[in-house]
Image (cartoon, rainbow, N blue to C red):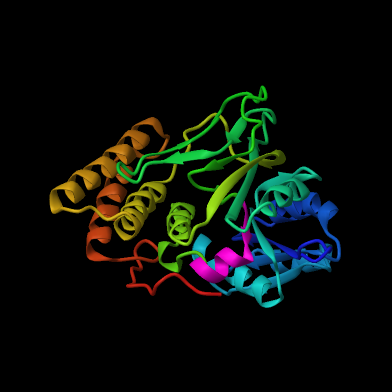
């Protein structure tokens, strides 16, 4: 970057819950400077969040979508805004996180090693207890559709302190390069929610990009460590539909029989996750069945408001 620090925009997506983004921004505020800017994309909140952010953080740009565009649509608004203003990197950060003061420099140290590194995700902990890991990398099988988060619910004893490539980044906190956005495109708006980072990673691989894990970059996520990983039926709907779509698009099966067995595998993975979760079982089963049916029909967007979406967005 010709002797200057890269220009980074931090995008915090919000949908209701005013206190969460304010707490997140208070922790992020310590890393802002002339080369690090903040954006809040508000996905149609009705609780006064946009005005509260403007009042508390005058330097933060607030973009109001006026409606819930989902995780993918809302983040794409922020990505386009940042890229239009010359961002070299964009950091997508959940509104229910707090960050270590050194998290961004540690991520940039890894991201700037090679142009092939398109994604960098930090080490993410539960907020309570703060030494319990939530994400230390991930594995994902394009054959079975099974994904596994490395380190989930393990105490951090330094067992994941090595920088390494990972099968996918974590959408909760991910640094994305301008080059990846330009060449591989932005998030797929059609997915709306869940599995978005898997689809993005599989697509980016075709352009020669990889994802890396930054163990010295630390983020804490406000999720409960005492319940199942997903407790809402929508998680199973989007999980089935979007996983099958991502695999069919980027790792298609050669025969109908193989495609059938992969559908069975993805469905089985989500059924097992449902049984281990706190989600209502009947509602969860309906969600899995609907996700499979909508995938087969090519129905995307928000659950219950299906659309035949366009291809992944370009910046």
Residue at far left of view: 257
Magenta residues span: 174-185
Q: Position of residue 162 (x, y in %)?
A: 64, 33
Q: Position of residue 131 (x, y in %)?
A: 68, 28
Q: Position of residue 35 (x, y in %)?
A: 81, 64
Number of numbered labels in the structure image? 0
Q: Is residue 172 above or below residue 139?
A: below
Q: Is residue 245 above or below residue 185?
A: above
Locate residue 48: give its quadrant: bottom right
Locate residue 147: give its quadrant: top left
The answer to which of 183 and 290 lies nearer the viewer is: 183
* Residue 248 appears left or right of 254: right
Residue at far bottom of view: 84
Q: Any magenta on residue 258?
A: no
The answer to which of 105 and 27 lies nearer the viewer is: 105
Q: Position of residue 46 (x, y in %)?
A: 61, 67
The answer to which of 286 and 205 lies nearer the viewer is: 205
Residue 45 in view here: no
Residue 127 in view here: yes
Residue depicted at x 36% and y 68%:
305
* Residue 153 appears left or right of 158: left
Look at the image and tell me in which quarter the C terminus lies. bottom right
* Residue 138 appears left or right of 38: left
Residue depicted at x 52% and y 42%:
166
Locate residue 231: give its quadrant: top left
Look at the image and tell me in which quarter the N terminus lies. bottom right
Residue depicted at x 65% and y 72%:
83
């Amino acid at each position: 970057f010709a002797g200057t620090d890269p220009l980074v925009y931090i995008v915090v997506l919000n949908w209701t819950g005013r206190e969460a983004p304010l707490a997140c921004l208070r922790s992020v505020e310590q890393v802002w400077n002339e080369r690090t800017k903040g954006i809040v994309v508000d996905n149609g909140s009705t609780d006064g969040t946009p005005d509260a952010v403007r009042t508390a953080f005058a330097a933060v740009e607030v973009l109001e979508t006026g409606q819930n565009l989902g995780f993918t649509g809302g983040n794409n608004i922020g990505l386009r805004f940042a890229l239009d203003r010359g961002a070299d990197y964009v950091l997508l950060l959940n509104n229910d996180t707090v960050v270590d003061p050194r998290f961004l420099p540690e991520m940039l140290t890894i991201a700037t090693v090679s142009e092939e590194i398109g994604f960098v995700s930090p080490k993410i902990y539960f907020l309570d207890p703060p030494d319990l890991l939530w994400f230390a990398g991930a594995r994902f099988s394009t054959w079975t559709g099974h994904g596994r988060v490395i380190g989930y619910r393990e105490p951090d004893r330094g067992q994941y302190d090595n920088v390494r490539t990972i099968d996918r980044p974590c959408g909760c906190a991910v640094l994305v390069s301008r080059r990846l956005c330009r060449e591989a495109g932005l998030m797929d708006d059609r997915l709306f929610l869940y599995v978005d980072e898997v689809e993005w990673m599989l697509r980016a691989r075709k352009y020669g990009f990889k994802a890396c894990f930054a163990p010295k970059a630390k983020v804490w996520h406000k999720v409960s460590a005492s319940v199942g990983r997903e407790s809402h039926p929508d998680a199973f709907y989007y999980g089935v539909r979007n996983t099958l779509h991502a695999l069919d698009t980027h790792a298609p099966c050669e025969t109908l029989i193989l495609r059938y067995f992969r559908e069975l595998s993805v469905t089985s993975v989500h059924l097992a996750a449902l049984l281990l979760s706190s989600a209502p079982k009947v509602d969860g089963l309906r969600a899995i069945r609907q996700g499979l049916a909508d995938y087969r029909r090519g129905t995307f967007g928000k659950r219950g408001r299906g659309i035949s979406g366009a291809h992944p967005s370009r910046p």
